[in-house]
Image (spheres, rainbow, N blue to C red):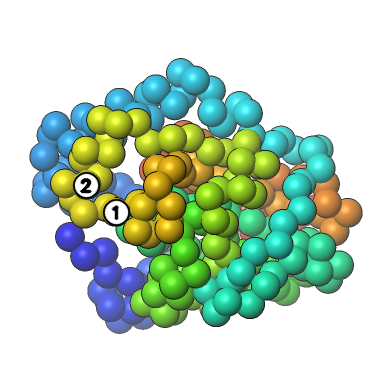
Amino acid sequence: MKWRSLEESAAGEDMRPLREIYAEREKLIEQYVPAATRETYARVVSELKEKGVAKSAIKEGDKAPEFELKDQNGKLVCSSDLLAAGKLVVCFIRGRWCPFCVAQLEAMSLIASQIKDAGAQLVTISPQTVQQSFFMGDQHKLQFPLLSDARNTVARQFGLVYRVPDYQQVVYKRVFVNLPHTNGDESWELPIPASFIIRSDGIVQYASANEDYAARPEPVEILQTLTDL
């Protein structure tokens, strides 16, 4: 199934809350994805929650790890440079193959100018290659840096990484989610989705991490938190 961008799918901008967009996509998944496959996805989320992966993520008040990654155009982006200019909003995503990641970034794109007006910059981080990030940015008209985190090095420092279990790898291969190709390595590792607001001094002021790929903060929540800081 091809997950169309907002520009492709409808005239104008989709200003609905992210939870409504997700609910719509979950209905499509229920309609088109076999029950056994959905059960596999649910099992993975359940197991990740049991392991408490999100609990290991950095929290509000922690010092955020510094990073230096390439964006979708191959330009090196340093967190220290970004923070020297103000606050930083960082969203960790799985990749362009994930419809929930696509919806999140399209929604964040709609408030990108407001984030800038609030004195902050927006970046996203995923394990996908620079080329895949370029494809994602181009297809979905994203005007902010999509940073490629090879082998989840930075995501690991943020406490977000897990290995896709063997039984889910079988499903991904069957539906053509080729992580070794998309991410450029054979680790089969991904970050759980997470969003952070980092102050100019590197201290995390907002943190949201969830093992459930369909549970992510509303962009307006991030924007409101950012303007309240």
The numbered mark at residue 178 is 1
| 37 in relation to 139, above or below | above
Q: From the top left corner, tell me how far across and down residue 40 is, in percent.
A: 24, 31
Q: Residue at x 64, y 49 (%)?
A: 154
Name the amino acid type tagged 1: Asn
- Find the residue positioned furthest to the front: 186
- Residue denoted by label 2: 173
**Label 2 packing within 10 angstroms: few (<14), some (14-19), many (20+):** few
- How many callouts does the rendering have? 2
Q: Residue at x 29, y 54 (%)?
A: 178
Q: Earlier in the sequence, mark 2 or mark 1?
A: 2
Q: From the top left corner, tell me how far across and down residue 113 is, in percent.
A: 63, 76
Q: Is residue 193 visible?
A: yes
Q: From the top left corner, tell me how far across and down residue 70 is, in percent.
A: 61, 69
The image quadrant that residue 56 belongs to is: top right
| 224 in relation to 109, above or below | above
The image quadrant that residue 76 belongs to is: bottom right
**Label 1 packing within 10 angstroms: few (<14), some (14-19), many (20+):** some
Left or right? Give the position of 36 relative to 64. left
Q: Are marks 2 and 1 in contact (CB under 8 Å)?
A: yes
Name the amino acid type tagged 2: Lys
Label 2 element class = helix
Q: From the top left corner, tell me how far across and down residue 162 is, in percent.
A: 48, 35
Distance of label 2 from label 1 (alpha carbons):
6 Å
- Find the residue positioned furthest to the top: 50
Q: Residue at x 76, y 46 (%)?
A: 64
Quarter that holds the N terminus: bottom left
Q: Which of the two residues, 101 or 176, is positioned nearer the viewer here?
A: 176
Q: Which of the two residues, 32 or 118, is positioned nearer the viewer here?
A: 32
The image quadrant that residue 13 belongs to is: bottom left
| 214 in relation to 41, above or below | below
